[in-house]
Image (tube, rainbow, N blue to C red):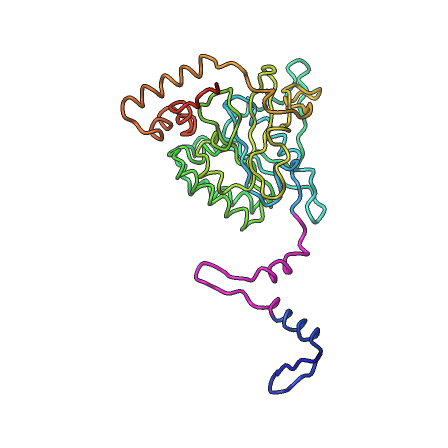
């Protein structure tokens, strides 16, 4: 079967297969279309264009990938900073496409120099842990604390990334970035700007965040993240570090959101760690295996839940909305809703 195509006033005779191939090439090479701030492109040429690009590498298990904006959150004093520094160290050894060690920046807004030294020095032998040469710790000078704005923080972040040629950033934590106003809308705006940095600078960013007051017997969900859905919407990956009822030094990690992979460490397969001091002096989280999240949740409702419920009921009686109660008590709206509207016990 033959087809005719008229090109530049000249008729070309070709087979149907050749004509279809030519038409497909025309479609595949079609220029992108501009719609103001948006750019349009058909799916087929887009997929063909990026097919030969390398897939993003895992930086730390399936929890954190290249060029992603990830969130690690959890309760206060559960070891988030310890875990984040472990992740930062691990990413240094994941080679770039050029075969180089990755340069990683750890923005430390939580710990003093002395506190970090004590964490990574054996109290008996005084031997200190040796960090990778490509991992740099960044802090804010005391004289600059009174001059901080969100804009100056973001500008400083970008300057540090470009001048050091870093490919990974860990920021501890988002509360400091947004300390002047911790409303969810403000934090979401900040996350959107950080997401823009990952795309513009081809950098991977891990942000640490806190968990508001919650009931310890409940399974960890995205609702337990401060700002919940508004913040997590801009993240490619979200995972939580939580305390375990197995012992004061036991922790577990649960994966709550992933875009570059399947959820590998969900409720039925959480990562289990124990906080210990290593032979080289550092405090770290030693991996012990995986298990079901239920094994790490306390089974009895304790006085903490009753105390929180009492406060919630008191504020509700005053006519405050669930969102207002959550903001005042530093907990999530979902927790307030559960306390005000408990599910009936099965008969």
| Quadrant in the picture for the N terminus | bottom right
Locate residue 31: give its quadrant. bottom right
- Give left or right: position of 292 versus 187: right
- Give left or right: position of 310 versus 224: left
Question: How many circles with numbers are drawn on the protein?
Answer: 0
Locate residue 147: give its quadrant. top left
Q: Position of residue 114 (x, y in %)?
A: 55, 22
Q: Position of residue 69 (x, y in %)?
A: 54, 41
Question: Does the magenta portion include 226?
Answer: no
State which region is magenta: 27-55
Residue under the point 56% across and 24% down: 242
Above or below, comparing residue 346 to residue 66 in the picture: above
- Direction front: furthest residue: 347
- Give left or right: position of 86 versus 153: right
Q: 103 and 321: which one is in front?
A: 321
Above or below, comparing residue 89 to residue 260 in the picture: above
């Amino acid at each position: 079967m033959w087809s005719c195509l008229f090109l530049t006033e000249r008729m070309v005779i070709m087979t149907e297969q050749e004509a279809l191939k030519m038409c497909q090439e025309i479609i595949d090479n079609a220029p992108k279309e501009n719609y103001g701030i948006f750019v349009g492109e058909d799916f087929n040429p887009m997929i063909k264009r990026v097919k030969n690009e390398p897939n993003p590498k895992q930086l730390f298990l399936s929890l954190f990938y290249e060029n992603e904006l990830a969130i690690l959150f959890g309760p206060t004093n559960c070891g988030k900073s310890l875990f984040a520094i472990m992740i930062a160290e691990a990413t240094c050894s994941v080679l770039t496409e050029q075969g180089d060690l990755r340069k990683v920046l750890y923005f430390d807004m939580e710990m003093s120099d002395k506190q970090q030294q004590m964490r990574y020095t054996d109290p008996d032998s005084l031997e200190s842990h040796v960090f990778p040469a490509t991992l740099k710790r960044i802090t804010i000078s005391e004289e600059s604390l009174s001059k901080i704005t969100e804009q100056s923080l973001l500008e400083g972040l970008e300057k540090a990334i470009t001048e050091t040629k870093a490919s990974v950033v860990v920021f501890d934590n988002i509360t400091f970035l947004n300390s002047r106003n911790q409303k969810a809308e403000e934090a979401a705006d900040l996350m959107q700007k950080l997401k823009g940095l990952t795309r513009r600078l081809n950098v991977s960013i891990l942000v640490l965040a806190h968990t508001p007051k919650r009931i310890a017997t409940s399974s960890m969900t995205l609702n337990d993240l401060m700002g919940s859905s508004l913040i997590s919407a801009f993240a490619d990956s979200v995972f939580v570090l939580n305390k375990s009822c197995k012992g004061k030094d036991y922790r577990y990690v649960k994966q709550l959101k992933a875009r570059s992979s399947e959820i590998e460490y969900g409720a039925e397969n959480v990562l289990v760690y124990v906080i210990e001091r290593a032979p080289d002096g550092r405090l770290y989280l030693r991996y012990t295996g995986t298990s079901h999240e239920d094994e790490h949740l306390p089974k009895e409702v304790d006085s903490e839940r009753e105390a929180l419920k009492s406060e919630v009921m008191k504020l509700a009686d005053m006519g405050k909305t669930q969102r207002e109660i959550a903001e005042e008590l530093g907990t999530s709206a979902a927790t307030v809703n559960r306390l005000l509207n408990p599910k009936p016990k099965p008969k």
